[in-house]
Amino acid sequence: MELNRLPGDAPIGDVVAAIREDGAAIVENFVSDTIADQVLADLREPFDSVGRSTENDFNGYTTLRVNSVLDLSPASAGIVGHRRMMEVLDAVLLPFCQSYLMGSNTAIEIHPGEGDQVLHRDDTIYPVHIPGLELQASVMWALNDFTQENGATRVVPGSHRWVKPREPGADDTVIQAPMKKGSALFYLGSVFHGGGANKSNGARAGLINTYCLGWLRQEVNHVLSVPRETAANLPEHIQRMMGYSLHGGMLGYYPTDDGRVPSREMNGGAMWGWQTD
Amino acid sequence: MELPVFKSDTSAAAVVTALRDTGAAVVERVLPDDIADACAAEMRPEFDRHGRMAENDFNGYTTLRISSVLRYAPSTRHIIGHPLALAMADTFLLPHCLSYRIGSNTGIEIHPGEKDQVLHTDDSIYPMRIPGMHLQINVMWSLCDFTAENGGTRVVLGSHKIGDYGDVPAEAVQAAMPKGSALFYLGNVLHGGGANHSNAPRIGLINTYALGWLRQEVNQYLAVPPEIAKQYGPTIRSLLGYAKHGSSLGHSRFNNDVWVWDGNDHDI
């Protein structure tokens, strides 16, 4: 069995249908090699300097991880806020919210010798589980080629439809998602997945971005984690997903310079909040 | 059904029982006058400067409103972190989360001439209902005497048990209470400010507390940023949101000095 695989120019509806079927799907060549290469180049130094700081049984011991990628790689904005990706997310998340937010932006480089990561769901950071109501969706972007040998992500297809909470067992199918650089693996927050073992002799680099319903707390506090001077230079649709926005015209408000709360029509200039004193 | 009213020496358990039954309860004279007065004094400049900025059909046009009082009125920490408020929040929220946060802290001064506010539920900012699961608990503190004439808060008792309250005729009772009292009401209880038929303003502070995995009503990281929040003890900093929910929700790369890493220290 293989995951559904669509070309980068596939109609959005086809991508969404494929994701709903298995809980995950691959869109090939979704971002240019130029952007993928640039992001990986930007992340090289952070990977090497702080990439080992999150080592543990869950994350592995020969895997490098870097958070807050937006602050480290300006080019990553082209992936984090990828417009056609957002059209897919609109279809998946907007049935349950009026706007969604970024959860986390995590670059992961799995080095040779790493074992299979334990299969897990990303949405267990929220202590509610309502089958059919997706709290978040994730997109893994290949920054170099993902293969069976070098640790392509493993997915348990159909696990988003499990009604009773349980862990994957020996009878459940686990399939790997090899994909070329610049491709994207979409998977729902309720889908069991994990990084693959790297049995090759090269590192496998990817960027995982998660997006959660706009009325939930974000996995990462982007307002604190991304310096304001960085945030100011990001496109407005990314600023909004960082949390500089309101859900439904009310939730998440903050005072602005003149004491008003930002309106639904606020422009990017409102993100600074209340600065006059 | 009558609004339950307790004296300040009540047990927390009695208030909990009343809240489960009616959805709202008053505890009288919880705060010493000096705390209530200090809070009102510290909020005064902000009322005068920004209090009219939130005017609209919902908030009214002769009512002053100011948000995020911890930014400029540090004495409010004694109210926001009051042990009785936290005891109620523990009881109603911790069954559904590992830690809770402040939603909003709003000073409201209703001036003479204001009309009844439309009855509403505060937790409707979250588009989800799971009966029996409380998303929020809220407290209106009177910083002067609240009377039937000057706009004491109106509450629809029992409305937290109505499955679909949209069509239910709402008969509200009014919470008259002396200065320094607390009106507790669950997030799904219909309530609203009262009309002020007196000749003096009525000043109160409403604090909301919500499950720690929900988005905060106010983005406290922008409203009370680390450089201001660091003046407070770990209880207030945690309530503001400078602490994770569980092991991994809501973490931050910076601001380690203001972040609270464990919940064992309860100094305000």
Image (cartoon, helix red, strand yellow):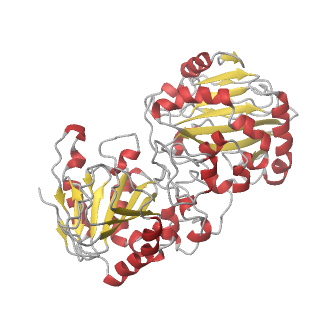
- Would residue B204 appear left or right of B41 to someone viewing this image? left
Image height check: is A175 above or below B175? above
**Residue B163 shows up from this direction:** no
- Could you tell me which residue is drawn at 33 percent across and 68 percent down? B204
| B68 and A126: which is toward the camera | B68
Q: Which residue is most to the left?
A: B1
Number of numbered discs? 0
- Could you tell me which residue is drawn at 52 percent across and 74 percent down? B233
| B69 and A111: which is toward the camera | B69
Residue B1: x and y in percent read 11, 55
Image height check: is B149 above or below B157? below
- Would residue A95 appear left or right of B93 to someone viewing this image? right
| A176 and B13: which is toward the camera | B13
| A38 and A43: which is toward the camera | A38
- Could you tell me which residue is drawn at 42 percent across and 69 percent down? B47
- Could you tell me which residue is drawn at 52 percent across and 27 percent down? A160
Position of the C terminus of chain A by quadrant = bottom right
Position of the N terminus of chain A by quadrant = top right
**Residue A75 shows up from this direction:** yes
Q: Which residue is most to the bottom?
A: B34
Residue A101: x and y in percent read 57, 42
Residue A125: x and y in percent read 53, 45
Residue B164: x and y in percent read 24, 38
